[in-house]
Image (tube, rainbow, N blue to C red):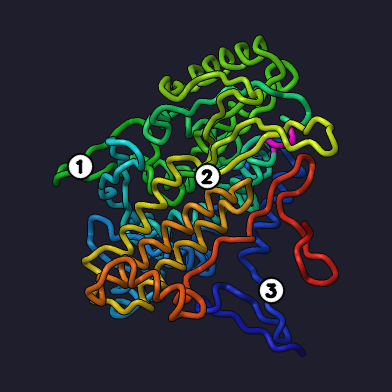
Amino acid sequence: MSAVSASPADGGVLVVDKVPLDKVRALQHTLYRTAKAEPERRFHALWDKVLRRDVLWRGWVAVRANNGAPGVDRTTLDWIEREYGIDRLLGELSRELRDGSYRPLPARRVYIPKPGTTEQRPLSIPAVRDRIVQAALKIVLEPIFEADFAPCSFGFRPKRGQHDALQVLVDETGRGRRWVVETDVANCFSAIPHDRLMTAVQERVCDQSVLKLLRAMLRAGVMESGVVHHPVTGTPQGGVVSPLMCNVYLHRLDRAWDTRAFGVLVRFADDLLVVCKSRQQAQAALARLRQLLAELGLEPKEAKTRIVELVVGGEGFDFLGFHHRMVRSRGVRGRRGMEFLARWPSDRAMRRAREQIRGLTLRSRLLLPVEAVVEDLNRFLRGWAGYFRYGHSTICFGKLQHYATDRLSLFIGKRHKHGRGFGLSVLAYKSVDRCGLFSLSGIVIAPRANKPWRRKPNAGGERRR
């Protein structure tokens, strides 16, 4: 007989002959396949799956990986690990959910600045225990709704991301769609009506215990300045389950969209783009967007709503951190170059990157060793470049590399009570690899129409150019 073992500490992994079988992943696959095969089915037996210890454990793993701030009870993730005990907390949550005594706490309201503006974005931070329950609920509900979501939706979905949405723009402009409608939903997370959201959820879920838990999460409210508010609209921005609920609600817009009549819709959460063939179609698409959003009780943000024609030498638009603009390639042997949609980091993205680099090399950090500052810089540059490398970003990368080198040389000079020149000499002559500073040269991959943005390695292990 084969040896079989399982424990929450293994994340709910069943081991058979030392071959791990992820039971939580298997559960999600089963729910997805069932929902995909039966589009009209409503699921009525989900509560027992939310209560499973391996599902709650996987919820804890997701919450711990995010490493968020504490909620109104001030309970931190580190304190739970060191003193309270993970198994003890998960056991208590399972019992409270099973006997009906679980009550979510109000979320803690904080405000963070919106990059590039003077506005502040409200965030609602649930308590750790509530985040675990939300994560467990998301594990069970996400595969059911994922089976229904339209191909035009890219935000907060498994195996989909920003570059998948950006590739659609490259493909469609290559097919001759040169008019773009851009907008986003005003205060989307805080404006979704609770009753309409629950109606959308009940199209697929009829388990009353699950619906009761979801209603309790929506009505838990937020605490601001010691006062608890219970709004009748909105899913708290900052909650684990909120992005899924946003997609569930806006799916009504996706499925009502007629691509043939109004153009290709690209939606990343509450950011919307429509790529059209003509000005008339773009105007009709904008009118249709306004109508569909009004039917959902939402409205577009007027300051970010416009129609752009993509022509060489014309204006472009910003979307998902990139600036997009139609350009013409250089001609070969007197031939006219090809027109294509190019993209590179937007001015706002470049400004934020410079601010981050400047913050990592401030005078207040002079007591740190140079190696520690370089490590922080490299961590940021690798993450930033990993996203923006998929574009025509060579010039922007060169500018940011120069800025990072200049700031590091200034930091080294100040640390040794000299000027920038001394720091430059250290980087150029006294260090073989510029003190280990990450290089942004030679890593850009230009997107091409109708080609996957992920380049598969060839037989030699190198990326195809």
| Main secondary structure along the magenta-highlighted residues | helix
- Along the line of sight, which residue is nearer the eye, 234 or 287? 287
Relative to 311, 426 lies left or right: left
User: Considering only order in the chain, which callout, 3 or 2, is on the residue closer to the N terminus?
Assistant: 3
Where is mark 3, residue-wise?
A: 21
Residue plotted at (51% across, 18% down): 295
Q: Is residue 37 above or below residue 316?
A: below
Q: Quadrant of residue 266?
A: top right
Residue plotted at (44% across, 21% down): 299
Residue plotted at (54% across, 30% down): 317
Assign a secondary structure to mark 3.
strand
Q: CA distance from mark 2 to mark 1?
A: 40 Å
Q: Quadrant of residue 455?
A: bottom right
Where is mark 1, residue-wise?
A: 228
Q: Amino acid at mark 3?
A: Leu
Is residue 356 magenta-colored? no
- Quarter of the picture containing the C terminus is bottom right
| Region of the chain picked out in magenta, as a range | 168-172
Q: Amino acid at mark 1?
A: Val
